[in-house]
Amino acid sequence: MTKEGRTADMAVAEGRATLQDVAERARVSTATVSRVLNGNYPVAAETRKRVEKAVRALGYVANAHARALAGVTSRTVGVVVSEIVDPFFSLIVHGIQREAAAAGRICLIGSTLGEEHRELEIIELLYEQRAEAVILVGGALLDERHQSKLAGRAKAMAAAGSKLVLCGRPPLAAPAPSAAVHYDNEHGALNATDHLMGLGHRRILYLGGWPGISTQRDRVAGYRLAHERRGLKVDPELVVEGEFSRRFGYERTARALADALDFTAILAANDATAAGALQALRDGGRRVPDDVSVVGYDDVPVAAETVPALTTVHIPLQEMGRAAVRLAVGPQDTGRKGDWSDDGPSQGSLVLGTHLVLRGSTAPAPVG
Amino acid sequence: MTKEGRTADMAVAEGRATLQDVAERARVSTATVSRVLNGNYPVAAETRKRVEKAVRALGYVANAHARALAGVTSRTVGVVVSEIVDPFFSLIVHGIQREAAAAGRICLIGSTLGEEHRELEIIELLYEQRAEAVILVGGALLDERHQSKLAGRAKAMAAAGSKLVLCGRPPLAAPAPSAAVHYDNEHGALNATDHLMGLGHRRILYLGGWPGISTQRDRVAGYRLAHERRGLKVDPELVVEGEFSRRFGYERTARALADALDFTAILAANDATAAGALQALRDGGRRVPDDVSVVGYDDVPVAAETVPALTTVHIPLQEMGRAAVRLAVGPQDTGRKGDWSDDGPSQGSLVLGTHLVLRGSTAPAPVG
DNA sequence: CTGAAAGCGCTTACAG
DNA sequence: CTGAAAGCGCTTACAG
């Protein structure tokens, strides 16, 4: 074992080495060590070498807390998701992780565990950790009190030089500063419905989705708009909301079949719901797409794996996550901290396009 | 607008309020404010009220960095995953999030983005953030250099009062301190293989899985052990390793069919691979389970959703995540910081059971 | 029950 | 190119 090796082990045995330890070993001041570590200041080559050697010998790793306290940003971005097991969220998070890694940031990920109203608690925890920015992933809770609390939080964060970024939901109402990256949700549903109508379907069952969230509101709106554009009325019996889940899709399709509800196609609120519908249809002896056409929404992996594979609305989920990080850590500070809180309501609002992916689950409406 | 409301807005406009601000407003010392906030010390009811009012008025949120620096633990647990989009990982992470929330912790989640050797970099980032513990999720890279670096890191962390927890992989070799929660991986594969053998299958294709990782090593070992126990030889042609992926499962099954490889059952390295095999079998005109039986591994949601549904090995993924957090933040410090680095090699090592879930993809081997 | 003060481990003007 | 010193926002003995 080398002398250096032994000393490193000793340092290890005593706990974490500090800047001070490194400075002493290299016989320089802590200021100098800090400078070589941050590499943003001229240091004599000779000195630099000594410091680097000491750093290695002691196995020194900077304390991010001390660094953050001393004024440098935390290099941490906060993320709030509902359920990480839901591919809609995990694909977005994947994009966030990729872009965060590229920007040298690490992610603090909080989950509401499916209880959306806990969003504010999680934001508070993330804010406590002084995340540079907090990204809220997924649809917005349709609750005025909740939204106004969110707006309050956004203001406080802006004033403190941090920011709130919305990902997969529309920007906050006017006076609150926030950035947002969204997708043309309503338009996606409009296209999907119109695709079915173009195939001759007139009685289309809208199935699934939780009405408490903006995602659902916009999808249903697109479904209705498609009818309106063709001068058709929506039969209220054909709009069955509830949950975004495979189980819900299965049960309600089975019930519709049992009730002999008249429909030739299903627009599901998301792919999981559509997969459930597919299974209920099969169990009920209906052929897809011969007897019934089915369209999903999201284009998560399962959509390509069902039998038949699902025609669905593609959302660039990963890209949306990446864009959110760009908005979050974006154009580096101009130095005027908290400054943009005065710039007006919104700090950039992106809308990504969606498009229909045609696969095997849709076909012309059966004749007769 | 109340007077208090106005002041709160003013404070907000000036950036984050500090303990000092609260103290001034409540006309007490910062020590007192700290005490009422932490509630671990007697404070006069009257004083407490004044402080609480000031906190609310200023919208004060503690700075976790300052708190951590001043000696309190960071209440942050680090997590390293490969691909968060893979349900194997996201289910474990879900369990981690649940338990972490219950313990009042927040998770810093780093991803290697599928490049396992980057694990060490991520650990370093997490260590920099002074995570209380770092949980490594998923199989271990079978690489001695990597393992010994990991051991070095584990020692350094232990000395610094933090710890490394392994989740879904075996404990580190002897002299490195670490806690681990694993599952009886080899046994699961043994059972699955034996189930097929019990149904009369003798030529079982082992399909998929990346040989560079402990997960695969143990599953293949279980497959071999099952043969050994029955005094059967493993035909090397029947062991097709490569990747854990649906695509790999599809392609290699299609190829096996094209090559007229002789087999009546498939043990897939995981459910995704099995789902790909199922599709190739269907595309190749084989009926499952009549012509070929298929068994998956993991029991992630997709296993219950394929047609037919997959017989597979269930791993208590969520529970494994929860257990990892318990090991991570576990029995609160006895105060002897870094002490357990001397206690021996391992800090508790749990092994959770797996079991076979019988669904529709397995049946007796076809006669003849 | 309350306060003054030291200290956690960094960074960064300010001098030299 | 280098160092002494202040300061970031907390917590916690130590006094009272």
Image (spheres, coloured by chain):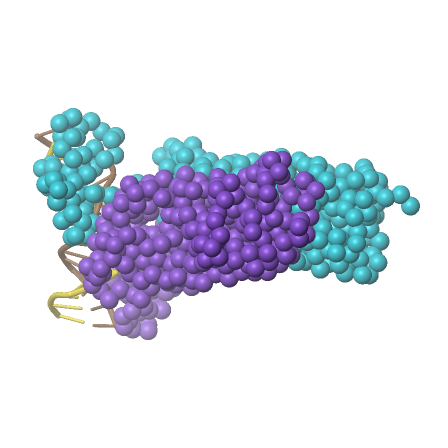
Chain colours: A purple, B cyan, C yellow, D brown
Residue A345 vs residue B176: left or right?
Answer: left
Name the residue: 56% across, 38% down: A252
| Closer-to-camera residue (B293/A36) | B293
Residue B54 vs residue A240: left or right?
Answer: left
Name the residue: 28% across, 59% down: A346
**Image coordinates for residue A147, horizontal then vertical, percent:** 30, 45
Residue B30 vs residue B112: left or right?
Answer: left
Q: Is residue B102 above or below residue A125?
A: above
**Image coordinates for residue B107, horizontal then vertical, percent:** 41, 45
| Closer-to-camera residue (A183/A17) | A183
**Image coordinates for residue A32, horizontal then vertical, percent:** 26, 64
Point out the image quarter for the N terminus of chain B.
Answer: top left
| The quarter of the displayed image where residue A122 is located | top left
Mark yes or no: residue A9 visible. Answer: no
Point out the image quarter for the C terminus of chain B.
Answer: top right
Name the residue: 45% across, 51% down: A224
Mark yes or no: residue B285 visible. Answer: yes
**Image coordinates for residue B362, horizontal then vertical, percent:** 76, 41
| The quarter of the displayed image where residue A100 is located | bottom left
Name the residue: 18% across, 49% down: B12
Report the number of numbered marks: 0
- Residue lying farthest to the right in this orientation: B368
| Closer-to-camera residue (A325/A57) | A325
| Closer-to-camera residue (B364/D15) | B364
